[in-house]
Structures are given as structure tokens and as C-alpha cells.
Image (spheres, grey):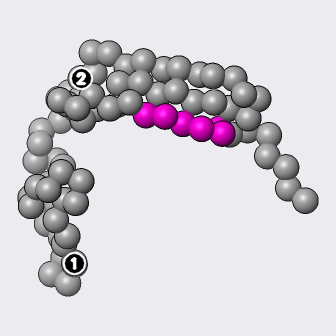
């Protein structure tokens, strides 16, 4: 028999629609305690050029369009 002592019953993510970044996390743990984390002033990838995030997939790789935003890139 396995018992779980850590974890969450529910996690709610609030997303900023203009930046698509997480702005708040509300989580209820197994003890029914509410934990809220607010994010402000997020700076992404400071000093990392965009080219570091581009990949060339191997020839036999299946590539699917971005189903979340509809972008084909």
C-alpha cells in the first residue's frame, strides 16, 4: 500500500493573454492549504540569443503546426 504525503489537489494557472506568460499560480495542497504565487516583471532569456532556441529537426522527423496558437512556424 502506497501513501502520498506531498502533492497538490488542484493547481490553477493564470496566464497573461498579451505575453502568454504565467502571472499567477494558485495551488491547494493535500492539507487543503492554499498557496498563491504572483509573478511580475518577468524578463525572459536575458543574454541568450534567439538562435539558441532554433533547431533543425532530422529529415525523418514529423513536424506538426502549433495547435495552440495556430502559427505554422
Give the vertical position of 35 relative to 48 (above or below).
above
* Percent coordinates x, y for residue 21 in the rendering: 28, 32
Which label is found at residue 62?
1
Work out whether residue 44 or residue 33 is closer to the camera in this orientation and state it.
33
Q: Earlier in the sequence, mark 1 or mark 2?
A: 2
Which label is found at residue 43?
2
* SS for callout 2: loop
Residue most toward the bottom? Answer: 60
* Percent coordinates x, y for residue 27 in the rendering: 57, 30
Q: Disc 1 to disc 2, how far (Cα)?
A: 32 Å
Residue 32 appears in which quarter of the rendering? top right
Residue most toward the right? Answer: 1
Q: Which residues are magenta?
A: 8-13
38 on left or right of 58: right
* Percent coordinates x, y for residue 37 in the rendering: 48, 20
Please report the residue visible at 38 percent of the width from the left and 30 percent of the height from the top. 14
Q: Are the residues at dot 1 and dot 2 in contact (C-beta closer than 8 Å)?
A: no
71 on left or right of 45: left
Work out whether residue 25 or residue 42 is closer to the camera in this orientation and state it.
25
Amino acid at each position: 500500500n502506497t501513501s502520498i504525503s506531498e502533492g497538490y489537489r488542484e493547481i490553477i494557472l493564470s496566464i497573461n493573454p498579451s505575453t502568454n506568460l504565467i502571472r499567477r499560480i494558485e495551488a491547494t495542497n493535500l492539507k487543503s492549504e492554499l498557496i498563491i504565487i504572483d509573478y511580475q516583471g518577468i524578463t525572459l532569456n536575458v543574454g541568450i540569443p534567439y538562435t539558441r532556441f532554433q533547431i533543425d529537426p532530422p529529415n525523418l522527423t514529423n513536424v506538426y503546426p502549433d495547435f495552440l496558437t495556430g502559427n505554422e512556424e
